[in-house]
């Protein structure tokens, strides 16, 4: 067990082997201590949990008494993959991605082909369904192609949601047999963007709540402002609170600093998208370049890991290149090793990056 401690913690506190009662749940990156553990051991365990979570996966808030879903720090994004969606999803899972994001929005996503890629990976024995985090979206009328949407645009919002979810459960089932849809579930469904009014957004949210926790495990929202997120988190009208927020991480929103702070305070995981495309200046910035040189990874991979270093943040990655898939997926563990071997250098680099995105003002 000692080898699992961050090295600087071992050196600083001269720890010996922790109590044998301590157990590691490697899947979720959670450390659980025996009640007899000392306060100091509990403190170290929390440190270990924080480090492991940042570079591996997070636990989403449990919904309605269920076991918490775990979400990997890298999520494979499937927008604009068109006819290549199935092959790219299969390749991504084969490369090591264990989270896939899609949407019931034929304009930009091919959800049925995403499902084909997932089923192929399961059939080939690369993963089981339980090993994957699968996320899709309910996209409102404003985000749809009028000639190709998964529901009747003239139907009430509640019926639109039910039709969309029915389609998604079919598309994302884990087995080829169409009848297997009865056992199909989705880890998280995200409202793609708030609807025209708060009342309509709440109507869609309430319709989604009826599927939790069985057919849908968690709910979230995308393209969301802080007032809207606060409403969903604090309103007495919502039974299931948001587990994730998926937003563009870029300068036009000041990198969502206040919203991300609210997420951390309210057990909401922030999912960053458009991360690389929208931030060429940050990729070229000094802290990113320093980290890339120290660790021996690409600037893009270094940038991704610094965004993850802001804590409680996962990143959508939509690369189509098999080599970059593997390089990007390997980077967090490489950076984790660097944080343990050179903690002062890591804190300096992370501090400079936090300054650039405004987090140091928190």
Image (cartoon, grey):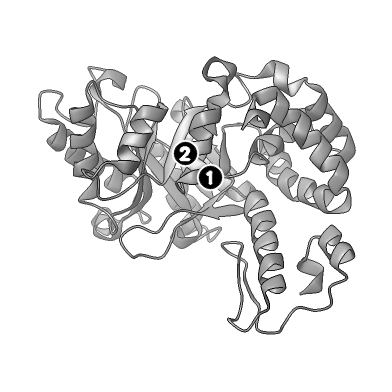
Q: CA distance from mark 2 to mark 1?
A: 6 Å
The answer to whether the residue labelled 2 contacts the one labelled 1, judged by CB atoms less than 8 Å apart, is: yes
Across and down, in percent, residue 163 comes to 18, 38
The number of numbered discs placed on residues in the rendered structure image is 2
The residue that label 2 is drawn on is 86
Vertical position of residue 51 compared to residue 255: above or below: below
Q: Secondary structure at mark 1?
A: helix
Across and down, in percent, residue 34 comes to 60, 81
Q: Secondary structure at mark 2?
A: helix
Q: Quadrant of the C terminus?
A: top right
Res. 14 visible in picture:
yes
The residue that label 1 is drawn on is 90
- Between 321 and 281, the residue placed more toward the observer is 281
Res. 274 visible in picture:
no
For image coordinates 80% across by 41% down, the residue present is 347
Across and down, in percent, residue 72 comes to 56, 50
- Between 275 and 102, the residue placed more toward the observer is 275
- Crowd tier of the residue under label 2, counting other residues whose Cα lies within 10 Å: few below 14, some 14–19, many 20 or above: many
């Amino acid at each position: 067990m000692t080898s699992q401690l961050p090295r600087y913690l071992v050196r600083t506190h001269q720890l010996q082997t922790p109590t044998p009662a301590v157990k590691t749940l490697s899947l979720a990156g959670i450390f659980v201590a025996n009640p007899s553990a000392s306060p100091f051991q509990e403190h170290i365990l929390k440190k270990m949990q924080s480090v492991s979570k940042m570079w591996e996966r997070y636990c989403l808030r449990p919904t309605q008494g269920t076991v918490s879903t775990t979400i990997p720090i890298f999520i494979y994004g499937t927008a604009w993959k068109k006819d290549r969606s199935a092959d790219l999803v299969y390749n991504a899972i084969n490369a090591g991605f264990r989270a896939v994001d899609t949407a019931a929005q034929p304009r930009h996503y091919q959800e049925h082909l995403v499902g084909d890629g997932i089923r192929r990976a399961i059939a080939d024995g690369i993963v089981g369904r339980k090993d994957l985090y699968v996320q899709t979206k309910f996209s409102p009328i404003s985000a749809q192609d009028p000639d190709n949407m998964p529901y009747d645009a003239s139907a009430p919002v509640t019926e639109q949601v039910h039709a969309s979810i029915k389609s998604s459960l079919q598309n994302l089932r884990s087995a080829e047999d169409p009848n297997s849809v009865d056992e199909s579930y989705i880890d998280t469904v995200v409202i793609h963007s708030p609807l025209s009014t708060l009342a309509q957004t709440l109507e869609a949210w309430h319709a989604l709540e009826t599927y939790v926790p069985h057919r849908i495990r968690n709910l979230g929202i995308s393209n969301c402002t802080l007032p809207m997120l606060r409403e969903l988190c604090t309103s007495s009208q919502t039974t299931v609170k948001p587990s994730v927020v998926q937003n563009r991480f870029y300068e036009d929103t000041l990198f969502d600093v206040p919203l991300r702070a609210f997420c951390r305070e309210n057990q909401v995981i922030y999912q960053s998208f458009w991360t690389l495309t929208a931030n060429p200046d940050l990729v070229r910035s000094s802290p990113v370049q320093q980290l890339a040189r120290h660790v021996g990874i690409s600037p893009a991979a270094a940038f991704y890991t610094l965004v993850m270093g802001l804590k409680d943040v996962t990143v959508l990655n939509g690369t189509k290149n098999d080599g970059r898939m593997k390089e990007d997926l390997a980077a967090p563990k490489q950076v984790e090793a660097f944080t343990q071997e050179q903690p002062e250098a890591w804190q300096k680099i992370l501090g400079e990056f936090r300054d650039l995105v405004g987090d140091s003002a928190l």
